[in-house]
Amino acid sequence: MALNCSTAQDVSKVIEENGIEFVDLRFTDLFGQWHHFSVPVDFYDEDDLFKSGLGFDGSSIRGFKSIESSDMLLVCDPTTAFVDPMTTNPTLCVIANVYEPGTYDAFDRDPRNVARRAEAYMKDNGYADVMFCGPEAEFFIFDQVKYEATPFSSGYGITSSEAAVFSGDWGPGHKVGTKGGYFPVAPFDQ
């Protein structure tokens, strides 16, 4: 369910009115991979989420930071809030911007910051007034699909580890790679 939140107070009101149990912070790496972590509403704090930010380990995100300087912050954008219709427990999702701790500078490899800088550059140089960007939604639903079409028979077989009935055989679906399972966003093939 899309929301019309513009402030942290709007988000807090939605949480209270909808019995939200978790707030899910989402962000992308430079390669477009979604990452997330959830915070129980018992630990929800407007200032932490929308002002000072929540810390996370940037060394576990491909292309972000090395381990010796891995501290990073996520600061939520209230205009991106939506209720996730697929979760068992009522969950509010919010897209976050990535910041450097201490200086609170926008992280130069945060895709949202890259887009803001590109838009400013485009306007400052008179190339255009408006820029339209969008994601390329691409993920795998099936682990394996087999089909047969001969003059005397036809058929198909589908294997999906996410299905209610799973044969137990693994297909060649996309696997979460080494160090790629830190803060993954569903769906992820196994």
Image (cartoon, rainbow, N blue to C red):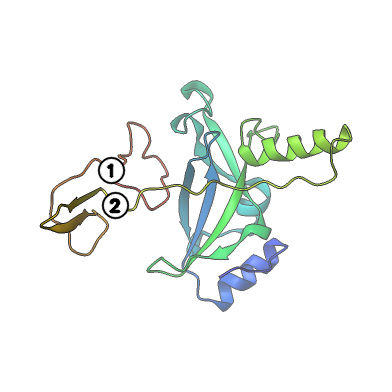
| Residue projecting furthest to the left | 152
Q: Residue at point 85% right, 35% down?
A: 127
Residue drawn where x is 50% and y is 64% of the image: 41
- Which amino acid, by three-letter code, is at mark 2? Phe
Closer to us: 114 or 66:
114
Q: Is mark 2 on a helix, strand or loop?
A: loop
Query: Which residue matches tag 2?
Result: 142
Q: Quadrant of the C terminus?
A: top left
- Residue appearing at x 39%, y 53% in the figure: 186
Tell me which numbered mark, 2 or 1, is placed earlier along the sequence: 2
Question: What amino acid is found at the position of numbered circle 1 in the picture?
Answer: Gly
Mark 2, other Cα within 10 Å: few <14 / some 14–19 / many ≥20:
some
| Residue at disc 1, secondary structure | loop
| Residue ranking furthest to the front | 151
Residue 91: image location, x then y, percent: 48, 65
Label at residue 173:
1
Question: Quarter of the image containing the N terminus?
Answer: bottom right
Q: Position of residue 180 (x, y in %)?
A: 38, 36
What is the x, y in percent for residue 115? 69, 39
Crowding around mark 1 (Cα neighbors within 10 Å: few <14, some 14 to 19, many 20+) is: some
Q: Which residue is drawn at 57% across and 56% down?
A: 94
Q: Which of 174 and 153 is in front in this view?
A: 153
Find residue 4 and report its image quarter: bottom right
In the shown orientation, is residue 158 left or right of residue 106? Answer: left
Question: Total number of numbered labels?
Answer: 2
Q: What distance separates the C-alpha of mark 2 from that of mark 1?
A: 7 Å
Query: In this view of the protein, which residue sits in the foreground, 128 or 151?
Result: 151
Cβ–Cβ under 8 Å for marks 2 and 1: yes
